Amino acid sequence: MKQCFVEKRFRKESLDLIKKINCIIEEYQEQGYELTLRQVYYQLVARAYIPNNERSYKNVGNLISEARLAGLIDWNAIVDRTRHVRSNSHWSWWIILIPLWLLFVYLPIGIILTRK
């Protein structure tokens, strides 16, 4: 669904690249595929439309974001397949560490101090 939220004027080069991006997206949608930003970027590189470097990747990401806001690229055309976090795993080690600390540090000190 293309929907314009922000009026923006693009340079001719940017409009040409947006057209190429839309052609790539449509080509893969016809085959039943959904593309990520990275896949669109590498298709642009493989077709020699842009160079393969970090700056180009950032520029394509910014261009796609602005083109979506301007209603030139379908919001649903590019998917985000990031990993989904199931739990806050970095706290789980406390569950094991605290009882071990009590067992091996606190209790022996208490036993030593209470001996006469």
Image (tube, rainbow, N blue to C red):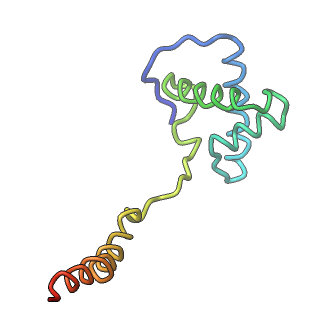
Give the farthest residue toward the front.
116
Q: Is residue 15 left or right of residue 97?
A: right
* Res 73 → quadrant: top right
Residue at position x 71%, y 37% in the image: 41
Residue at position x 51%, y 22% in the image: 70
Q: Is residue 31 left or right of residue 9?
A: right
Q: Does 4 appear above or below 104?
A: above
Number of numbered discs overlaid on the protein picture: 0
The percent coordinates of residue 21 (x first, y second) are 69, 31
The percent coordinates of residue 104 (x first, y second) are 33, 81
Q: Does 108 appear above or below 58?
A: below
The percent coordinates of residue 27 (x first, y second) are 74, 42
Q: Is residue 47 left or right of residue 60?
A: right
Q: Nearer the viewer, residue 29 or 49?
A: 49
Residue at position x 63%, y 29% in the image: 58
The percent coordinates of residue 34 (x first, y second) are 63, 49
Residue at position x 56%, y 46% in the image: 79
What is the quadrant of the C terminus in the image?
Answer: bottom left
